[in-house]
Image (cartoon, grey):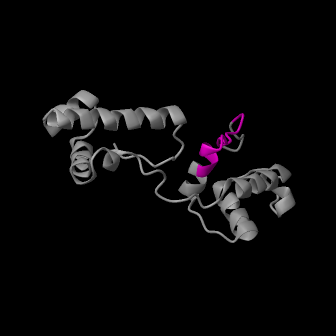
Amino acid sequence: MRYPQGGGLTAERQAFRERVRMEAVEMFADGRGSTEVAKELRVSVRSVQRWRRAWLEAGRSGVRSQGPASRPKLSDALFAVLEEELAKGPVAHGWSDQRWTLSRIKTLIGRRFHKSMTLSGISQMLRRHGWSHQVPARRAVER
């Protein structure tokens, strides 16, 4: 049940996953096996084993979520600046057409904020903030 900490999860989804871990703790206290717990909670046995080890070492608090594993590359304030830059359009930043590609956004982030991000990292960041990829309305005649 690996997932990016805070990686686009809503507050409800985070709370749900926390409840699943706490249910597992209750089952550990009842003496139930890892396979049985995994099957009932519909998670991997490996996750249950990891939770059990954390529970044995630190108790209930050891199983609780520790929050995001790392801070995002762009803070909310910097992302707001990025949105303003994206709203200006690609032409304002030196490209000849009106398409924002991930590589162009990567270049813009590098120029504007002096930070380096992967294309998949940029895609995930944009999706987290409600942006979606653009798809042409019709197929190009040349194809």
Magenta stretch holds residue 130: yes
Give the vertical position of 66 relative to 20 (above or below).
Answer: below
Q: What predominant SS class does the magenta segment belong to?
A: loop
Q: Residue at x 86, y 59 (%)?
A: 92
Front residue of 47 and 65:
65
Q: Residue at x 22, y 51 (%)?
A: 53
Q: Position of residue 127 (x, y in %)?
A: 61, 44
In the image, is 40 to the left or to the right of 135? left
Q: Position of residue 46 (x, y in %)?
A: 23, 46
Front residue of 48 and 86:
48
Image quadrant occupied by the C terminus:
top right
Q: Give the extent of the magenta segment.
A: 125-138
Q: Residue at x 16, y 32 (%)?
A: 30
In the image, is 122 to the left or to the right of 6? right
Image quadrant occupied by the N terminus:
top left
Give the vertical position of 10 relative to 116 (above or below).
Answer: above
Q: Position of residue 125 (x, y in %)?
A: 60, 51
Give the vertical position of 135 relative to 125 (above or below).
Answer: above
Q: Position of residue 132 (x, y in %)?
A: 65, 41
